Image (cartoon, rainbow, N blue to C red):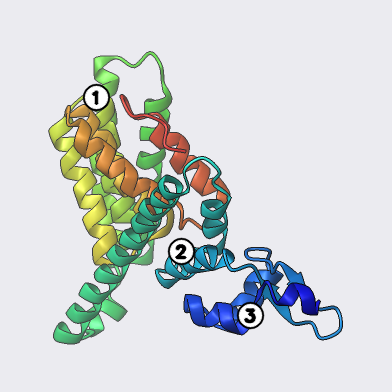
Amino acid sequence: MSERAGQLVTIGQLARRTGLTTKALRHYDRVGLLEPAAVDRDTGYRYYRAEQAATARLIQILRSVDVPLEQVRMCLAATDDQAAACERILIQHRRRLQARLDRVRSALHRTDHLISEGISTDMIDHQPETEAAAQDERKLAVDLFNGVWRLLEQEDRTVEDDDRMLHMAHASRHHWGQVGAAVNLSRGEWQCSRVYAVLGRGEPALHHAQRSLDTCRANGIGDWDLAFAYEALARASAVAGNKDHARMWTEQALAAADDIADPEDRELVLSDLESIPGQPRFW
């Protein structure tokens, strides 16, 4: 080892050259991200080749902006054009950060509102006149929402069916407005947007999609509801003939989809994005 060690650098030397700590270098060795060229069997000391400093610096740069380890690994594994691979990974990472920032901004906005306006007893204690009335209204909202889905899935809709579908979507959103939480309002706006998009009406589809997103942002709603709000804007933009906006909102939806906890919900968002007219596959 002493002969080989003369041709190598110690873990401390590599740390000083790259800005990484020795603790981080040991961790990257354990996870297989940056393995030493040699390890002394007697002392356990790690030794690295001098040219490994470039890889260590790249890891340090990517981790300094919180790029996940698995994506750092993908960047290092690129054999054709590592710079291009890292750029793609950074673009995807920026989308995730932007989606996260949107959620934080909406939470801050809602928090500022609560601080300035206070939490009133109406917010806490308000209930419909009777529980039975609230249950009836909630049932109407659910039944109408599900009825719209059945019509959307119907292949041989008539003009009358289309009219009924549109009115039912608005009626469902109205009833959710009486008894629903913010997430129900966002989903109601999303469904109105989807119906208008299916009917080829871009302007109202954009209007309701934006309201769905605004509701998510104002109330700190994330996960698949936020991703679907972006999806609605992408679809409405495509229907309105704005390909650039459609692509922009699709990218936002993809970034938000990365943060969806349930894999099945994530797949649902991705498959819906794939069905947007004129959009390429991004995944």
- Please give the label number shown on residue 62: none
Q: CA distance from mark 3 to mark 1?
A: 64 Å
Q: In the shown orientation, is residue 134 left or right of residue 207? A: right
For mark 3, what is the residue? Answer: 11
Q: Residue at x 24, y 84 (%)?
A: 121
Residues at circles 2 and 1 in contact by the CB criterion of under 8 Å: no
Q: CA distance from mark 3 to mark 2?
A: 23 Å
For mark 2, what is the residue? Answer: 67
Q: In the shown orientation, is residue 77 left or right of residue 145? A: right
For mark 1, what is the residue? Answer: 199
Q: Position of residue 114 (x, y in %)?
A: 21, 81
- Element on which disc 3 rests: helix
Q: Position of residue 272 (x, y in %)?
A: 42, 35
241, above or below 117, in the image: above
Q: Amino acid at mark 3?
A: Ile
Query: Mark 3 or mark 1, which is nearer to you?
Result: 3
Q: Residue at x 63, y 70 (%)?
A: 28
